[in-house]
Amino acid sequence: MKGAVKMMLEQLGWKPFFADHFAAYLSEGYSVGRIAVEHKNMYRIYSEYGDLLAEVSGKMHYTAAGTQDYPAVGDWVVISPRLEEKRATIHAILPRLSKFSRKAAGKRADEQVVAANVDTVFLVTALNHDFNPRRIERYLTLIWNSGSSPVIILSKADLCDDIAEKVAEVENVAYGIPIHVISAVQEEGIDELEKYLRVGQTVAFIGSSGVGKSTLINRILGEERLKTREIRQGDDRGKHTTTHRELIVLPESGVVIDTPGMREIQLWDASEGVSETFNDIEELALQCKFRDCQHNSEPGCAVRKALEEGTLAKDRFDSYLKLQKEAEFVEMRASMSLNAIERAKWKEITKYVKNKNGGIR
Protein backbone atom coordinates (compact mmCIF):
# COMPACT_ATOMS: atom_id res chain seq x y z
CA MET A 1 0.00 0.00 0.00
CA LYS A 2 1.52 3.32 -1.10
CA GLY A 3 2.26 6.03 1.46
CA ALA A 4 -0.26 8.59 0.14
CA VAL A 5 -3.00 5.97 0.05
CA LYS A 6 -2.14 4.81 3.57
CA MET A 7 -2.31 8.39 4.90
CA MET A 8 -5.68 8.93 3.24
CA LEU A 9 -7.06 5.70 4.67
CA GLU A 10 -5.66 6.52 8.12
CA GLN A 11 -7.66 9.75 8.14
CA LEU A 12 -10.74 7.59 7.50
CA GLY A 13 -9.89 5.46 10.55
CA TRP A 14 -7.66 2.77 9.03
CA LYS A 15 -5.74 0.91 11.75
CA PRO A 16 -3.16 -1.93 11.89
CA PHE A 17 -5.99 -4.25 13.00
CA PHE A 18 -7.74 -3.81 9.65
CA ALA A 19 -4.47 -3.94 7.69
CA ASP A 20 -3.64 -7.34 9.20
CA HIS A 21 -7.00 -8.78 8.16
CA PHE A 22 -6.82 -7.19 4.72
CA ALA A 23 -3.32 -8.51 3.89
CA ALA A 24 -4.58 -11.72 2.25
CA TYR A 25 -7.06 -9.80 0.08
CA LEU A 26 -4.41 -7.24 -0.91
CA SER A 27 -2.19 -10.00 -2.28
CA GLU A 28 -5.10 -11.11 -4.48
CA GLY A 29 -5.50 -7.65 -5.98
CA TYR A 30 -8.52 -6.43 -4.06
CA SER A 31 -8.95 -2.89 -2.73
CA VAL A 32 -10.53 -1.57 0.45
CA GLY A 33 -13.07 1.11 1.26
CA ARG A 34 -15.19 2.37 4.13
CA ILE A 35 -18.99 2.50 4.07
CA ALA A 36 -20.12 6.14 4.18
CA VAL A 37 -23.83 5.82 3.41
CA GLU A 38 -26.15 2.82 3.30
CA HIS A 39 -28.97 2.98 0.77
CA LYS A 40 -31.44 0.20 -0.04
CA ASN A 41 -29.26 -2.54 -1.59
CA MET A 42 -26.58 0.06 -2.44
CA TYR A 43 -23.71 1.70 -0.57
CA ARG A 44 -21.62 4.84 -0.91
CA ILE A 45 -17.97 4.03 -0.21
CA TYR A 46 -14.93 6.22 0.52
CA SER A 47 -11.82 4.70 -1.04
CA GLU A 48 -8.44 5.55 -2.49
CA TYR A 49 -10.28 6.06 -5.79
CA GLY A 50 -12.69 8.58 -4.31
CA ASP A 51 -16.42 8.03 -3.77
CA LEU A 52 -17.80 4.84 -5.29
CA LEU A 53 -21.31 3.42 -5.49
CA ALA A 54 -21.25 -0.26 -4.57
CA GLU A 55 -23.36 -3.40 -4.18
CA VAL A 56 -22.62 -6.70 -2.43
CA SER A 57 -21.54 -9.67 -4.51
CA GLY A 58 -23.93 -12.54 -5.23
CA LYS A 59 -21.87 -14.89 -3.07
CA MET A 60 -21.91 -12.50 -0.12
CA HIS A 61 -25.65 -12.06 -0.46
CA TYR A 62 -26.20 -15.84 -0.59
CA THR A 63 -24.09 -16.60 2.51
CA ALA A 64 -25.54 -13.80 4.67
CA ALA A 65 -27.56 -15.24 7.56
CA GLY A 66 -29.15 -11.94 8.53
CA THR A 67 -28.92 -8.16 8.36
CA GLN A 68 -25.85 -8.18 10.61
CA ASP A 69 -23.91 -9.90 7.81
CA TYR A 70 -24.39 -6.98 5.44
CA PRO A 71 -22.23 -3.84 5.51
CA ALA A 72 -23.14 -1.03 7.90
CA VAL A 73 -21.97 2.58 8.00
CA GLY A 74 -18.41 2.60 9.33
CA ASP A 75 -17.54 -0.88 8.06
CA TRP A 76 -14.31 -1.49 6.16
CA VAL A 77 -15.08 -3.65 3.14
CA VAL A 78 -13.11 -5.58 0.53
CA ILE A 79 -13.96 -4.32 -2.95
CA SER A 80 -13.18 -4.74 -6.61
CA PRO A 81 -13.63 -1.27 -8.19
CA ARG A 82 -14.97 -0.56 -11.67
CA LEU A 83 -13.42 2.86 -12.08
CA GLU A 84 -14.91 3.65 -15.48
CA GLU A 85 -18.36 3.33 -13.90
CA LYS A 86 -17.34 4.83 -10.52
CA ARG A 87 -18.80 1.71 -8.96
CA ALA A 88 -17.55 -1.31 -7.03
CA THR A 89 -18.52 -4.77 -5.85
CA ILE A 90 -18.27 -5.61 -2.14
CA HIS A 91 -16.89 -9.09 -1.49
CA ALA A 92 -16.38 -9.15 2.29
CA ILE A 93 -16.56 -7.14 5.50
CA LEU A 94 -13.34 -6.87 7.48
CA PRO A 95 -13.71 -7.89 11.15
CA ARG A 96 -15.24 -5.10 13.25
CA LEU A 97 -13.37 -3.49 16.14
CA SER A 98 -16.71 -2.38 17.55
CA LYS A 99 -20.35 -2.30 16.52
CA PHE A 100 -23.27 -0.34 17.93
CA SER A 101 -26.26 -2.65 17.55
CA ARG A 102 -29.87 -2.74 18.60
CA LYS A 103 -32.72 -5.16 18.03
CA ALA A 104 -34.37 -4.36 14.72
CA ALA A 105 -37.96 -3.17 14.87
CA GLY A 106 -40.55 -5.94 14.66
CA LYS A 107 -41.18 -9.28 16.36
CA ARG A 108 -38.23 -11.15 14.84
CA ALA A 109 -34.98 -11.27 16.79
CA ASP A 110 -32.80 -9.57 14.17
CA GLU A 111 -29.73 -7.48 14.90
CA GLN A 112 -29.49 -4.03 13.34
CA VAL A 113 -25.94 -2.68 13.21
CA VAL A 114 -26.32 1.09 13.54
CA ALA A 115 -22.61 1.93 13.16
CA ALA A 116 -19.37 -0.05 13.05
CA ASN A 117 -15.76 0.57 14.05
CA VAL A 118 -16.61 3.52 16.28
CA ASP A 119 -14.03 4.68 18.83
CA THR A 120 -16.26 7.06 20.78
CA VAL A 121 -20.03 7.43 20.97
CA PHE A 122 -21.43 10.88 21.73
CA LEU A 123 -24.72 10.24 23.52
CA VAL A 124 -26.56 13.50 22.93
CA THR A 125 -29.40 14.41 25.29
CA ALA A 126 -31.13 17.79 25.28
CA LEU A 127 -31.52 19.73 28.52
CA ASN A 128 -35.20 20.39 27.88
CA HIS A 129 -38.27 18.16 27.65
CA ASP A 130 -36.13 15.38 26.11
CA PHE A 131 -34.13 14.92 29.32
CA ASN A 132 -34.67 11.41 30.70
CA PRO A 133 -32.13 9.57 32.94
CA ARG A 134 -33.84 6.23 32.27
CA ARG A 135 -33.34 6.64 28.53
CA ILE A 136 -29.69 7.54 29.16
CA GLU A 137 -29.26 4.24 31.02
CA ARG A 138 -30.74 2.35 28.08
CA TYR A 139 -28.43 4.07 25.58
CA LEU A 140 -25.39 3.49 27.80
CA THR A 141 -26.21 -0.22 27.94
CA LEU A 142 -25.99 -0.40 24.14
CA ILE A 143 -22.84 1.72 23.98
CA TRP A 144 -20.93 -0.31 26.57
CA ASN A 145 -21.89 -3.49 24.76
CA SER A 146 -20.66 -2.07 21.43
CA GLY A 147 -17.03 -1.91 22.47
CA SER A 148 -16.94 1.88 22.07
CA SER A 149 -16.33 4.51 24.77
CA PRO A 150 -19.31 6.66 25.77
CA VAL A 151 -19.26 10.43 26.19
CA ILE A 152 -22.44 12.22 27.28
CA ILE A 153 -23.30 15.51 25.56
CA LEU A 154 -25.98 17.57 27.30
CA SER A 155 -27.16 19.87 24.52
CA LYS A 156 -29.41 22.96 24.34
CA ALA A 157 -28.02 24.38 27.57
CA ASP A 158 -29.52 27.72 26.55
CA LEU A 159 -32.99 26.24 27.16
CA CYS A 160 -32.26 25.01 30.70
CA ASP A 161 -32.53 26.89 34.01
CA ASP A 162 -31.31 24.09 36.29
CA ILE A 163 -28.19 22.78 34.53
CA ALA A 164 -26.35 21.82 37.74
CA GLU A 165 -29.26 19.69 38.95
CA LYS A 166 -29.55 17.83 35.65
CA VAL A 167 -25.79 17.23 35.48
CA ALA A 168 -25.98 15.74 38.98
CA GLU A 169 -28.80 13.43 37.83
CA VAL A 170 -26.67 12.23 34.92
CA GLU A 171 -23.65 11.69 37.15
CA ASN A 172 -25.80 9.40 39.31
CA VAL A 173 -26.47 7.07 36.36
CA ALA A 174 -23.20 7.49 34.42
CA TYR A 175 -20.36 6.80 36.82
CA GLY A 176 -16.97 7.97 35.53
CA ILE A 177 -18.27 8.86 32.06
CA PRO A 178 -17.21 12.27 30.64
CA ILE A 179 -20.11 14.75 30.58
CA HIS A 180 -20.06 17.94 28.49
CA VAL A 181 -22.68 20.69 28.61
CA ILE A 182 -23.01 22.58 25.33
CA SER A 183 -25.13 25.07 23.46
CA ALA A 184 -24.71 24.84 19.70
CA VAL A 185 -26.79 27.99 19.26
CA GLN A 186 -24.52 30.02 21.53
CA GLU A 187 -21.45 27.97 20.51
CA GLU A 188 -20.57 27.18 24.11
CA GLY A 189 -18.69 24.04 25.18
CA ILE A 190 -18.05 22.79 21.63
CA ASP A 191 -14.28 23.36 21.82
CA GLU A 192 -14.12 20.77 24.62
CA LEU A 193 -15.10 18.06 22.12
CA GLU A 194 -12.07 18.56 19.86
CA LYS A 195 -9.93 16.11 21.89
CA TYR A 196 -12.19 13.24 20.76
CA LEU A 197 -12.04 14.24 17.07
CA ARG A 198 -8.41 13.47 16.29
CA VAL A 199 -7.16 12.13 12.95
CA GLY A 200 -7.99 8.44 12.63
CA GLN A 201 -10.72 8.56 15.28
CA THR A 202 -14.37 7.80 14.58
CA VAL A 203 -17.11 9.40 16.65
CA ALA A 204 -20.78 8.42 16.29
CA PHE A 205 -23.58 10.75 17.38
CA ILE A 206 -26.47 8.86 19.02
CA GLY A 207 -29.64 10.23 20.55
CA SER A 208 -33.35 10.82 20.19
CA SER A 209 -34.91 12.90 17.43
CA GLY A 210 -34.51 16.64 17.79
CA VAL A 211 -31.74 16.70 20.43
CA GLY A 212 -29.47 18.73 18.14
CA LYS A 213 -27.06 16.13 16.71
CA SER A 214 -27.06 17.60 13.19
CA THR A 215 -26.73 21.17 14.49
CA LEU A 216 -23.75 20.14 16.60
CA ILE A 217 -22.06 18.42 13.66
CA ASN A 218 -22.59 21.53 11.55
CA ARG A 219 -20.85 23.62 14.22
CA ILE A 220 -17.94 21.19 14.30
CA LEU A 221 -17.71 21.23 10.49
CA GLY A 222 -17.95 24.99 10.37
CA GLU A 223 -20.63 24.84 7.68
CA GLU A 224 -24.32 24.05 7.33
CA ARG A 225 -23.77 20.64 5.78
CA LEU A 226 -26.63 18.79 7.46
CA LYS A 227 -30.25 19.91 7.36
CA THR A 228 -31.70 21.16 10.62
CA ARG A 229 -35.05 22.57 11.69
CA GLU A 230 -36.08 25.10 14.27
CA ILE A 231 -37.42 23.75 17.55
CA ARG A 232 -41.18 23.70 18.03
CA GLN A 233 -42.73 26.33 20.21
CA GLY A 234 -44.38 24.95 23.33
CA ASP A 235 -42.30 21.86 24.01
CA ASP A 236 -38.76 22.89 22.96
CA ARG A 237 -38.44 19.78 20.80
CA GLY A 238 -36.57 19.77 17.54
CA LYS A 239 -38.02 18.03 14.53
CA HIS A 240 -36.49 14.86 13.13
CA THR A 241 -34.28 15.75 10.16
CA THR A 242 -31.64 13.04 9.68
CA THR A 243 -33.18 10.16 7.71
CA HIS A 244 -30.14 7.92 7.23
CA ARG A 245 -26.78 7.15 8.78
CA GLU A 246 -23.82 8.92 7.22
CA LEU A 247 -20.06 8.95 7.75
CA ILE A 248 -18.63 12.45 7.37
CA VAL A 249 -14.91 13.27 7.03
CA LEU A 250 -13.86 16.27 9.11
CA PRO A 251 -11.29 18.66 7.60
CA GLU A 252 -7.82 17.87 9.00
CA SER A 253 -9.39 15.71 11.70
CA GLY A 254 -11.20 12.40 12.18
CA VAL A 255 -14.61 11.24 11.00
CA VAL A 256 -18.08 11.43 12.53
CA ILE A 257 -21.19 9.33 11.95
CA ASP A 258 -24.56 11.04 12.11
CA THR A 259 -27.52 8.79 12.90
CA PRO A 260 -31.29 9.32 12.79
CA GLY A 261 -33.06 9.78 16.09
CA MET A 262 -34.12 6.46 17.59
CA ARG A 263 -37.78 6.07 18.47
CA GLU A 264 -37.16 2.52 19.69
CA ILE A 265 -34.08 1.59 21.71
CA GLN A 266 -34.44 -2.17 21.91
CA LEU A 267 -31.49 -4.03 23.38
CA TRP A 268 -29.42 -6.56 21.48
CA ASP A 269 -27.00 -8.99 23.19
CA ALA A 270 -26.64 -6.48 26.01
CA SER A 271 -25.88 -8.52 29.15
CA GLU A 272 -22.37 -7.07 29.42
CA GLY A 273 -23.70 -3.59 28.74
CA VAL A 274 -26.21 -3.89 31.58
CA SER A 275 -23.40 -4.86 33.96
CA GLU A 276 -21.30 -1.85 32.91
CA THR A 277 -24.18 0.63 33.07
CA PHE A 278 -25.31 -0.58 36.50
CA ASN A 279 -21.91 -1.45 37.95
CA ASP A 280 -22.91 0.24 41.23
CA ILE A 281 -25.74 -2.28 41.67
CA GLU A 282 -23.54 -5.17 40.54
CA GLU A 283 -20.94 -4.20 43.15
CA LEU A 284 -23.63 -4.03 45.82
CA ALA A 285 -24.82 -7.51 44.81
CA LEU A 286 -21.33 -8.87 45.51
CA GLN A 287 -21.82 -7.86 49.15
CA CYS A 288 -25.04 -9.88 49.52
CA LYS A 289 -24.88 -12.80 51.97
CA PHE A 290 -25.97 -15.30 49.34
CA ARG A 291 -24.31 -15.51 45.94
CA ASP A 292 -27.62 -16.29 44.19
CA CYS A 293 -29.51 -13.52 46.01
CA GLN A 294 -32.54 -12.30 44.04
CA HIS A 295 -32.73 -9.06 46.08
CA ASN A 296 -36.27 -9.77 47.26
CA SER A 297 -36.56 -10.83 50.90
CA GLU A 298 -33.34 -12.78 51.45
CA PRO A 299 -31.47 -12.03 54.70
CA GLY A 300 -28.23 -10.10 54.33
CA CYS A 301 -29.17 -8.51 50.99
CA ALA A 302 -26.93 -5.48 50.43
CA VAL A 303 -29.12 -4.23 47.56
CA ARG A 304 -32.31 -4.17 49.67
CA LYS A 305 -30.40 -2.45 52.46
CA ALA A 306 -29.22 0.27 50.05
CA LEU A 307 -32.79 0.75 48.84
CA GLU A 308 -34.11 1.06 52.40
CA GLU A 309 -31.37 3.52 53.37
CA GLY A 310 -31.94 5.59 50.22
CA THR A 311 -28.38 5.22 48.89
CA LEU A 312 -29.82 3.40 45.87
CA ALA A 313 -32.77 4.99 44.08
CA LYS A 314 -35.72 2.67 43.53
CA ASP A 315 -36.34 3.87 39.96
CA ARG A 316 -32.71 3.08 39.07
CA PHE A 317 -33.03 -0.42 40.56
CA ASP A 318 -36.32 -0.95 38.70
CA SER A 319 -34.61 0.15 35.47
CA TYR A 320 -31.80 -2.34 36.14
CA LEU A 321 -34.26 -5.22 36.60
CA LYS A 322 -36.21 -4.23 33.48
CA LEU A 323 -33.14 -4.02 31.22
CA GLN A 324 -31.70 -7.22 32.68
CA LYS A 325 -34.91 -9.14 31.86
CA GLU A 326 -35.08 -7.57 28.42
CA ALA A 327 -31.48 -8.57 27.64
CA GLU A 328 -32.17 -12.15 28.75
CA PHE A 329 -35.32 -12.31 26.60
CA VAL A 330 -33.55 -10.96 23.50
CA GLU A 331 -30.70 -13.43 24.01
CA MET A 332 -33.19 -16.30 24.17
CA ARG A 333 -35.04 -15.10 21.02
CA ALA A 334 -31.76 -14.63 19.17
CA SER A 335 -30.69 -18.17 20.04
CA MET A 336 -34.00 -19.54 18.75
CA SER A 337 -33.66 -17.48 15.56
CA LEU A 338 -30.10 -18.71 14.98
CA ASN A 339 -31.20 -22.33 15.36
CA ALA A 340 -33.98 -21.74 12.82
CA ILE A 341 -31.50 -20.23 10.35
CA GLU A 342 -29.14 -23.19 10.74
CA ARG A 343 -32.00 -25.66 10.17
CA ALA A 344 -33.07 -23.78 7.03
CA LYS A 345 -29.50 -23.81 5.69
CA TRP A 346 -29.13 -27.56 6.20
CA LYS A 347 -32.51 -28.11 4.56
CA GLU A 348 -31.33 -26.18 1.47
CA ILE A 349 -28.02 -28.08 1.38
CA THR A 350 -29.83 -31.44 1.64
CA LYS A 351 -32.22 -30.43 -1.14
CA TYR A 352 -29.29 -29.36 -3.35
CA VAL A 353 -27.45 -32.66 -2.78
CA LYS A 354 -30.61 -34.69 -3.57
CA ASN A 355 -31.19 -32.81 -6.82
CA LYS A 356 -27.57 -33.18 -7.83
CA ASN A 357 -27.70 -36.93 -7.25
CA GLY A 358 -30.93 -37.32 -9.15
CA GLY A 359 -33.02 -37.83 -6.03
CA ILE A 360 -30.91 -40.80 -4.81
CA ARG A 361 -30.55 -40.85 -1.03
Image (cartoon, rainbow, N blue to C red):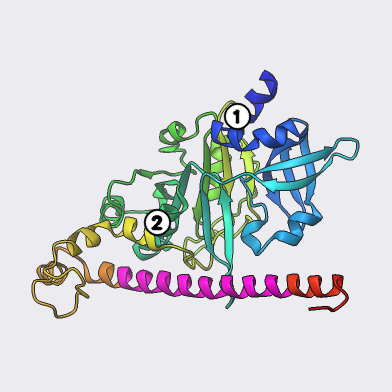
Residue 102 in view (yes/no): yes
Q: Amino acid at mark 2?
A: Leu
Task: Give residue 11's mark.
Answer: 1
Which of the 4 image quadrants contains residue 83?
Answer: top right
| Chief secondary structure of the magenta portion | helix
Residue 243 in view (yes/no): no
Report the residue at 68% width, 74% height from top: 344
Q: Nearer the viewer, residue 199 or 183?
A: 199
Q: Earlier in the sequence, mark 1 or mark 2?
A: 1
- Provide residue 329's location: percent of width, then percent of height: 44, 75
Q: How many C-alpha atoms fall within 10 Å of the one at disc 2: few (<14), some, or many (≥20)?
A: many
Q: Which residue is mark 2?
A: 140
Report the residue at 56% width, 32% height from top: 15
Q: Amino acid at mark 1?
A: Gln
- Provide residue 256's location: percent of width, then percent of height: 57, 41
Image position of 271 with respect to 215: above or below: below
Q: Nearer the viewer, residue 221 or 20?
A: 20
Read off the magenta span.
Answer: 319-347
